[in-house]
Image (cartoon, grey):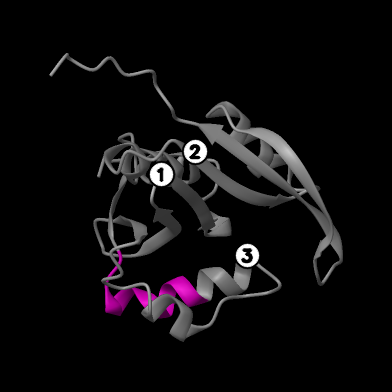
Amino acid sequence: MRPLPESRDAVRIRPARAEDIARVVALETEAFSDAWTWASFENLLGDPRALFAVAYDDDGLVHGYVVAWYVVDEGEIANLAVASTSRRRGIGGSLLDAALDEARTRDVTSVYLEVRDSNEVARALYASRGFVQVMRRRRYYRTPTEDALVLKLDLHQPRTHAPR
């Protein structure tokens, strides 16, 4: 996975490990009102269909994570969160890029995600990578009730095949 841009307190990205789950669950609870459970994250470890990666610093502290699923030629960014104290440092973008790089490696042609309509920071990040809105799911989120925007990124590149 690609390292994050160097900074005063640089972080890198790697696959999540069992010892990361406590911190990931804490970040999940901080970021989302409908938090995933410990078991949800634990079940991702070693799942060949998923990318579960963390952004961490030299001291091993996890600052963010991403979960993505890949099935046949489609991918889904299922979850992405960055600690509130670590935002605005490019961590979310680097985690997203890691998931998109993995999608390309797996020959995925389309990547989807859902985002709260009011989450302008996340929407701007996704737009910066080329995601476009393809659907609105009314009242999808709870606590508070809010619409979800379904975004899609087309990774399909025309390929030329050599004659057989």
Amino acid type, residue under disc 3 in the picture: Ala
Q: CA distance from mark 2 to mark 1?
A: 7 Å
Can you give x and y, in whole percent of width and height, for residue 9 in the image?
Answer: 34, 46
Counting residues from the N terminus, which is met first, the one under dot 1 or under dot 3? 3
Can you give x and y, in whole percent of width and height, for residue 95 in the image?
Answer: 41, 47
Q: CA distance from mark 1 to mark 3?
A: 29 Å
Q: CA distance from mark 3 to mark 2?
A: 26 Å
Amino acid type, residue under disc 2 in the picture: Ser
Residue 31 circle label:
3
Counting residues from the N terminus, which is met first, the one under dot 2 or under dot 1? 1
Q: Which residue is mark 2?
A: 110
Proximity of marks 1 and 3: CB atoms separated by less than 8 Å: no
Magenta stretch containing residue 23, yes or no? yes
Can you give x and y, in whole percent of width and height, for residue 110 in the image?
Answer: 49, 38
The answer, for residue 80, to whether it is visible in the render is no
89 to 52, vertically: above or below: above
